[in-house]
Image (tube, grey):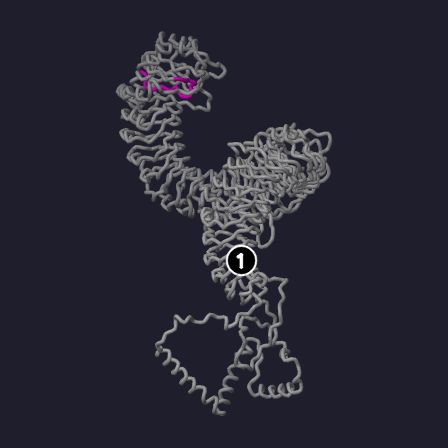
Amino acid sequence: MRIIMLLWLFLIPFLANLFCSHVVLVAGQCQSGQQSLLLQLNSSLNFNASRSVHLVKWSQNTDCCNWSGVDCDVGGRVIGLNLSFESISGGIENSTGLFSLQHLQRLDLAYNRFNASQIPSRLANLSNLTYLNLSNAGFAGQIPVEVSNLTRLVSLDLSTLSFLGSGLLKLENPNLKVLVQNFRELRELYLDGVNISANGNEWCQALSSLSNLQNLSLSSCFLSGPIHSSLADLHSLKVIRLDQNNLSSPVPEFLAGFQNLTSLHLSSCGLNGVFPKKIFQVQTLETLDLSNNVLLGSLPDFAENLSLRTLMLFDTNFSGTLPESIGNVKKLSRIELRSCNFSGSIPTSMSKLTELVYLDLSNNNFSGQIPSFQMSKNLTNLDLSYNVLSGGISITEWKGLQNLVYVDLRFNSFNGIIPPPLFELPSLQKLQLASNQFEGLLPEFSNASSSVLDTIDLSGNRLEGSIPKSVFEISTLNILLLSSNKFNGTVQLDSILRNLTRLELSYNSLSVNASSYSPFLSQITTLKLASCNLSGIPNLKNQSRLFHLDLSQNQISGEVPNWIWNVSNGSLTHLNLSCNLLMGLQEPYSIPNLGVLDLHNNQFQGKIPQPPATAAYVDYSRNSFTSIPPDIGKFLSSTLFFSLSNNSLSGVIPESICNAINLLVLDLSSNNLSGMVPTCLIERMEGLVVLNLRRNNLNGTISGTFPGNCGLQTLDLNGNQLEGKVPKSLANCTKLEVLDLGNNQISDTFPCWLKNVSSLRVLVLRSNQFYGNISCPEVNGKWPRLQIVDLASNHFNGTLPGKCLTTWQAMMVDEDEAQSNLKHLRFEFLGLSRLYYLDSITVTSKGLEMELVKILTLFTSIDLACNNFQGHIPDQIGLLKSLYVLNLSHNSLTGSIPSNIGSLGQLESLDLSKNNLSGEIPPQLASLNFLSFLNLSYNHFVGRIPTGTQIQSFDPTSFEGNEGLCGPPSVTNCRDSNKSQPSASHSSKKFDWQLILMGIGFGIGSGLFVAPIMFSKKVNRWYDNQIDKILMVILPMVGLVYTNSHQRRIQAEEILEDENTDEYEDEDHEFEPETEEFRGRYCVLCSKLDITRKKVIHDKNCTCHDSPPTSFSSTTSSSSSSLAVLR
């Protein structure tokens, strides 16, 4: 027995060292000297006794080796001291007792509050320390050089978390190299949050001497890259954590050489280049975190028996497909690949990942169906949102996932019904299926009473029927989002569950009954009931937490009750009452500190309500307000968006509006405002992004100087009475995208100085008095994004600048590229709230003016009509292959239409009328399949109109005024004599004997066949009978009646007699057939394909004519084969 005990005495220290445990032997009492030192330490420290776990329990009446946080060796000497989380705030620098514990091996002061004091240099006295942990203890400043004298250290942790509010530790003098130069035994180094500020060569070489180092953690240390090859000398490394540094370099491939590597954390390091695939194949690697970098790369074919458990690549540029071999990595428990560029289907082999707990593949381009996760019994989180996944969701796949807590399948293309078992999962808390194509009825919740569902988001689908009552019986439900479906029926608001905090039922076919008297039971935070057939505002007086209320697009009439401003004790931040029948605000009222106030499209009148001073978004548009308060500006100090458009406002624009220094969007369009544009709007509003004053009665000049830091993106002054010139300081607005000065009286030359504004997309100068040429030969600037140019109805002259057209790159992109970049021109001023401003302009297309309320980046147009342009149409026009509208009418252009106009494959409207163009219409014009408007009238075109898919469908007026044109659809027929004869230069004086012999052979053969018919009555009669037999079989099959030759001769004799009796009848009178089978209606020129080439459009104003008689007795027929004969 004694031998066994002796063996244990030797084994325990060995096992403690092997397993890094804190096993110690305590024999006898604590040495009195040691206890005195500890009591002196206790008395010198400042700590919060109510939060202390260890220090508060120390008592001189007990053995110090039994004190909490104290470890002793067999001789009663203190070798371990754990004072972490003791709320110590000071006194350590005077703790002589601490620095006299000469046998101390482990010291832990982590997570205290030393109030940015410096690390005591007297720690060097503790020369036997092997473990020192000062992490997040509140120390700050320079790490003392004396720490480097602790040569026996095995583990050093000086890390700090900046969000805890403590100051930063730093390594300047000594630097990292000096600090670690004596740490020959060091295995663990944690310096996270310490300001090291060293480049890759410095910090890597400083660490290269730590040959025993296993754990290296230097996140947020202000390190820079690249990672130097000297780091490869640390062969024992198991953990590398370099997150949140500015390495800005590729990942070195030598990291794959660490044979013991278990964790590699390189998130948020600015890493670039292609990630080495070899690192994925390190056999010992368990955790790989490369998130939030600009790394490129793809996943390899995974080998079997890898140790990988956590794979985090989110917010990188990894792309390609997920390999089927990912199923080989059977230990994977966490996969985060969100916000990458992965595509293709999700491998079915993922069903083999039985240890999977967390899967996030959101914000990629995955397609196809969801694989089965039925074997992943431990799965708690499944996020596949924002992909292009499709198909239905299997009912059986969800039954076994008893631990599933979070399911997010939003923004995909899933269809079919939502499987009822999904709602019955016992652990499910959040179910988000919004913005898919689910349809059918929402099932009843059979386990409503036991469900732990917290969130149900089914908005943006095609669900129909009534909302199950059991939904409102889920006691844990806080968020219910059912907007934008096809739900119908009636919902009683007073029956809504008390725990519900967010309810959205907007845009269904529901009728929500909301009593104006009975209070709403739930303490709601967000209530969205847009388009819910409400006739009144619900009684929300008792609400104390409501901050977002949307009652838009209902039939609420009368006045807005004044109690609404006191909801939630004035804490309401978002109020949308737009698109109702409201006429005013109940007096007295005081609008609270709203962030969003939307009253647009109602029937408000008179003076506009005073906006709340805190509002970022104020929309009073589309009402009948008549006046703006002179001091309006002082209420807009926080406003970003302010719209009074489409009212009946009169008077001048108050200059106080310029006090709204944070204003980004100002829209006063479509009113009766007069006077000049306030100079301060131009000179003082540096932050203004959208200024829309169109359709008013503003006059005078555009005075003032646009500031050098002008941020305007949209300037719309269309439809006023402005005069003078365009300020050249407008070139300071280098972010300008939309400039609309149309329909004014501005007299100026073409603004060549705007060529340096490369962001310009829309330029409208129409209906002014601009003059001169537009070639800008002395300006080298380009407009690569320009998509709409409207210079019509001015006095421009000169030639069209072909070189300039070559810089309009936005009009040259392919259709596929244009579709991929498809969006509206808009300005998002509150990104998180999805509030944005949409630009709108008026363009002339297909002969009609139309307002583009939403300007697509896909739409391109050039309108130079009604000017004095001369010369040829430049050949460069053929480069604009994405052009939709081209109008060069009412100019003095000469020459021919360029043949490469056939390259404009997207062209829908072409107007070249009333010019001096000549020559033939190029046949390439007939290949424009999308062309639905064409006007070439009043030019000097000659020759035959080309034939094509669309061109014959246009009205003859599209070609009138061209005396030399002929052929359909013009009214002038082409004559054979007009056909060009072969040129004499092509004639040959030599006989072509091959042609002569062919002609002789054809003549002899024809004679042998025709002669018997002409000279032999028997042969002639036999031939007629055979033809009659064939025609009597074929023609009835297509609905025609045929008479044989014998009957035809008798009829001919009868007709001849009739003709003799009516010989003076009008010779142009058409022959009337005996039966209606021979007549029909044809509308060949009245129908055409639409722009999609999939649907036939019939012009109701086009006149259809009776078909001409069809003669079956004649052996020849006129060219009417294209006419349809109907029975």
Q: Quadrant of residue 1044?
A: bottom right
Judge whether residue 131 is colored magenta.
Answer: yes
Q: Position of residue 889 (x, y in %)?
A: 56, 54
Look at the image and give the residue range highlighted in magenta: 128-141
Name the residue nearer the viewer: 581 or 894. Answer: 894
Q: Chief secondary structure of the magenta span?
A: loop
Relative to 944, is 650 above or below?
above
Task: Give the residue at mark 1.
Answer: 916
* Residue 173 appears in the figure: yes
Q: Position of residue 816 (x, y in %)?
A: 46, 51
* Residue 443 appears in the figure: no
Image quarter (top left, top right, bottom left or bottom right) of the C terminus: bottom right
Image quarter (top left, top right, bottom left or bottom right) of the N terminus: top left
Relative to 1039, is 565 above or below?
above
> What secondary structure is marked by label 1?
strand
Name the residue nearer the viewer: 673 or 412. Answer: 673
Relative to 1093, is 174 above or below?
above
Q: Position of residue 363 (x, y in %)?
A: 46, 41
The residue located at (42%, 19%) in the rendering is 137
Name the residue nearer the viewer: 78 or 341. Answer: 341
Judge whether residue 342 is colored magenta.
Answer: no
Q: Quadrant of residue 611?
A: top right
Left or right: residue 830 compared with residue 272: right
Q: Quadrant of residue 560?
A: top right
The residue located at (54%, 43%) in the rendering is 749
Q: Position of residue 738 (x, y in %)?
A: 54, 42
| Amino acid on which disc 1 is placed | Asn
Relative to 763, is 875 above or below?
below
